[in-house]
Image: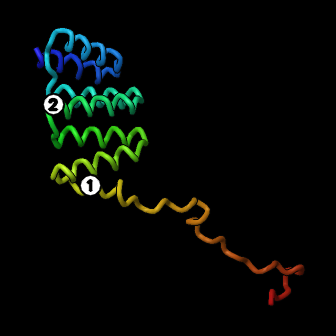
Amino acid sequence: DVISYTALIEANLRAKQFDRCFELAHRMSSDNIEPDEATFVPLIRAAAGAGQPARVRELLSQALACIGASAPLFSVAVTSFARLGVFADVRSCLADVQQRCFSPPPSTVSPILDPPDPAPPPEATAPPRPVHPPRPSHPHAHPF
């Protein structure tokens, strides 16, 4: 059943056996068991863990077609795309979320749409070195 397959997918995700997650999803489909939100979320995380943004897109598309939109689904997709560095897809997901009248938490949207200024290089933040007057050539000579 869907619960058993989902549990196996999650266990393989925790073990970082990403290909095994996809094999289980394929077998689930062969057994005519429809995935639910709880199944798609770890599958999307597995695709991100495997470094496969195209598979994240594909799974998100399948999930939207099968079960419809949900906040957890978009949350995992946005997080996955961000971890993969595919920020165009992050923005696309967030636009889709807003179009579907979800309100993503500001902590998810703000760092992506309004990223903070990059940190200055370390040498720019180092305190200035003190400037010492030249040492006199004679130990009793005045430095001025």
Q: Earlier in the sequence, mark 2 or mark 1?
A: 2
The one nearer the camera, 97 or 137, is 97
Residue depth check, mark 2 versus mark 1: number of the one nearer the observer: 2
* Image quadrant in which the N terminus is located: top left
In which image quadrant can residue 52 be found? Answer: top left
Residue 4: give x, y in percent of width and height: 13, 15
Disc 1 residue type (three-letter): Ser
Can you say whether 54 is above or below 141 in the image? above
Residue 139: give x, y in percent of width and height: 85, 80
Local packing at callout 1 (Cα closer than 10 Å; few below 14, some 14-19, many 20+) is: few
Disc 2 residue type (three-letter): Glu
Tell how many labels.
2
In which image quadrant can residue 79 be found? Answer: top left
Q: Is residue 61 left or right of residue 140?
A: left
Q: Which residue is mark 2?
A: 37
The dot on residue 107 is 1
Helix, strand or loop status at disc 1? helix
Identify which residue is drawn at 20% across, 13% down.
Answer: 28
Identify which residue is drawn at 19% across, 25% down.
Answer: 39
Helix, strand or loop status at disc 2? helix
Can you say whether 121 is above or below 48 in the image? below
In which image quadrant can residue 50 be found? Answer: top left
The one nearer the camera, 54 or 47, is 54
Distance in Å between CA atoms under marks 2 and 1: 23 Å
Identify which residue is drawn at 43% across, 42% down.
Answer: 85
